[in-house]
Amino acid sequence: MGRIEKKKKLIVERANRKMLGESEMDCPKAAKDLELNTKNRNSAIKADHIKYGPLNVDEPGDYWKDLAEHWDTTEEAAKKSLCGNCVAFDISPRMDDCMPGKTSDDDGRLGYCWMHNFKCHSARTCYTWAKGGPINGDDVSYDWQERNQE
Ligand code: SF4
């Protein structure tokens, strides 16, 4: 099946599910599959172009210093570019329904990262952070998922 046919099929499927009052798409696989989520998260921690972290937000070590050097900015500025305000951080209502349980703690909350496909935390960040988030609406969330499937 070609790209356009696939897209058409997806649009019809979404419209039908919406008409039936169902969620328009299934949850992304990693949101439900612990093994896949962990694999993707570990890759995001290790990859030199991603470096997801810090592991412990209370004991960040040199994480923010290194990040500031990477962005050629101050630590204070680097700490303002977090998953919580990243363009790929999905905390839409439909994504909340995909989460396995409680999503918040004292430092923030969990959401789904569409760039690296795992559940990330709003108080962490990575080298591929991009301005413009978070994703709050279901429509935007479905659009990211659709583009992920292309
Ligand atoms: S949400 Fe953004 S900052 Fe967080 S891991 Fe994903 S791409 Fe990186």
Image: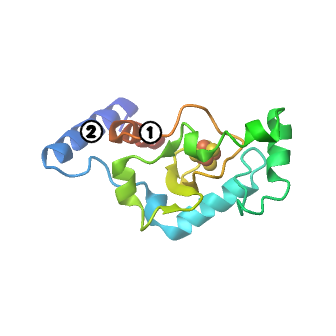
Residue 9's tag is 2
Residue at the limit of the structure toward the left, as seen here:
20
Identify the residue at horizontal 13%, vertical 43% (top origin): 19
Residue hosting label 1: 144
State the CA–CA distance, disc 2 to disc 1: 17 Å
> From where the camera sits, is residue 91 visible?
yes
Residue 97's tag is none
Looking at the image, how many numbered discs can be counted on the residues? 2
Q: Quadrant of residue 107?
A: bottom right
Identified by mark 2, the residue type is Lys
Identified by mark 1, the residue type is Trp
- Please determine whether, in this image, residue 21 is positioned above or below residue 102: above
The nearer-to-camera label among 2 and 1 is 1
Quadrant occupied by the N terminus: top left
> From where the camera sits, is residue 115 visible?
no
On the rendering, which quadrant does ligand 1 occupy?
top right
Q: Earlier in the sequence, mark 2 or mark 1?
A: 2
Quadrant occupied by the C terminus: top left
Identify the residue at horizontal 47%, vertical 61% (top origin): 103
Identify the residue at horizontal 58%, vertical 39% (top origin): 86
Does 10 sit left or right of 135 as displayed? left
Does 143 sit left or right of 39 as displayed? left
Q: How busy is the neighbourhood of tag 2: few (under 14 within 10 Å), some, or many (20 plus)?
A: few
Does 132 sit left or right of 13 as displayed? right
Q: Quadrant of residue 14?
A: top left
Task: Kindly tell me whether mark 1's CB lies below 8 Å from ligand 1.
Answer: no
- Residue 97: x and y, percent? 34, 58
- Residue 6: x and y, percent? 34, 37
